[in-house]
Image: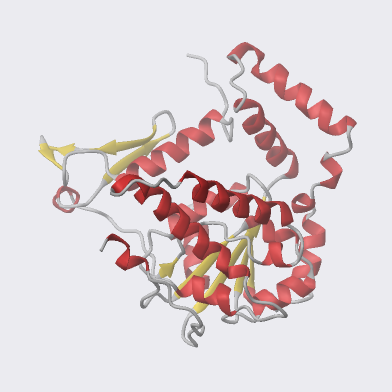
Amino acid sequence: MKHAERSFVKDKQFPDDVQMLFCIGAQKAGTTWLFHLLRESKHIHFTKNKELHYFDVIYGKAKQLHEVRINAVKMLAHKLGNEIGAYNDNHLDALIDLSQLLRIYSNHDGNHQAYVSYLLNDHSDQDVIADITPAYAILDRAGFTEMGRIGCAKFIFILRDPVDRMWSQIRMAVGSQNHQAESFQRACEQRARHLIANNRLANIERGNYQRTIEELESAIPLNRIKYIFYENLFSENTIFDICEELEVRCHAQVVTVDKLKTADEVFITSTAGGVMPVTRIDKRPIASGNIGPLSKQIMDAYWQMHNEGKHRDPVKY
C-alpha cells in the first residue's frame, strides 16, 4: 500500500537524551539557509516542514496563517474526484501531510503533546530535534517559557543589520513583480517611501531585536541562548560554533582527488562563479554524472540571494 509509510503515532514523549533546538529571527535573516545546511546532518532531525508555526499560532500571533492552512485543506478536499485509480493520489498525499500538521493545534491549556508527537514522527536516533520558525521572535516571555520546557530547549536567535534586512525584504517583494532591470531600483525606492509614509517600518515586530532579547532572556537562561549575526552566519567559524553548541560533530579536512572521485556530490565556489557543481574529474563521472540534489539546492539558494542583491557589489570589467 502506498500510504502504509504515512502512519502517525500519537502521544509520544520527548526523549530525555535528545536536545530540542529553536531557531528564531527576523525576515531575510538567513534562517532558510541554516535550515538547508543543518538538515543535511545525520545528527539533527527535522519534520517535513521548516516552519511549524505552532507557538505563534497558539499564542494568537498568527491566526491568519492558521486560517490559510485550514482553507488549504478544504481546497484539497474539494479537488478530490470520484474516479477510481491514481487520480487522487497527489491530492491525498498533500491532504494527509497538511492534516497531520494541523493536528499539532489539537491540544489546549499548556499540553503540547500533539506538537511533540509531530516533532518525533520519523525520528530515529538523532541527537537534536529542530524547529526553525523565525516568527517565534514575536513571542513574549510566556511563550518562550513554554518553548523552553520542551527538551530543555536551546535557542538560536539570528539578527541582521536592520537597514540591510529591510532593503533585502523590499528587493524580494519588488522582484516578485517582474520589473524591468532599469526600473527595479526606482520601484524599490518607491516601496520604501510608501512603507515610511504609512509608518510600517517602525511596526515590524520581528525587527524589534531589543524587545525579543528582553523577553527571551527573561524566560531562558543565557547558557541556552546563542546570538548570531547574519553578517557572520556564512563563515566556517560560525557553523562550527553552532555545531559545538548542539554537540554535533563537524569538521573541515583536506580532501584527496581519490576521495573526491568516490563522493556523492562535489561542488566548488568562487567570488565570481558562485557555487559550481562538479560532475566529472579526470573525465570520470562523479556518482551518476549529474548535478546532485544538494549541490543544486545550494546553487539555487546562492543565486536567489545574488538576484535579491544580498552582499552584491557590481564589478565593472
Q: x and y percent of residue 306 in the render?
A: 52, 32
Q: Give the side of residue 282 with respect to residue 118, left or right.
A: left
Residue found at the far bottom of this picture = 16
Q: x and y percent of residue 26 in the render?
A: 68, 51
- Answer whether residue 236 is visible to the viewer in this image: no
Quadrant including the N terminus: bottom left
Instruction: Residue at 26% x, 39% y: name it.
Output: 291
Q: x and y percent of residue 63 in the render?
A: 73, 56
The front one of 146 and 206 is: 146
Q: Give the side of residue 2 with respect to residue 172, left or right.
A: left
- Answer whether residue 128 is visible to the viewer in this image: yes
The front one of 303 and 63 is: 63
Instruction: Residue at 58% x, 69% y: name it.
Output: 104
Scheme of colours in the image: secondary structure
Instruction: Residue at 60% x, 53% y: name it.
Output: 69
Instruction: Residue at 82% x, 61% y: name it.
Output: 211
Above or below for 92 versus 250:
above
Above or below for 67 versus 123:
above
Residue found at the far front of this picture = 82
Residue found at the far top of this picture = 182
Image quarter for residue 180? top right
The front one of 135 and 53 is: 53
* Count of number-bearing discs: 0
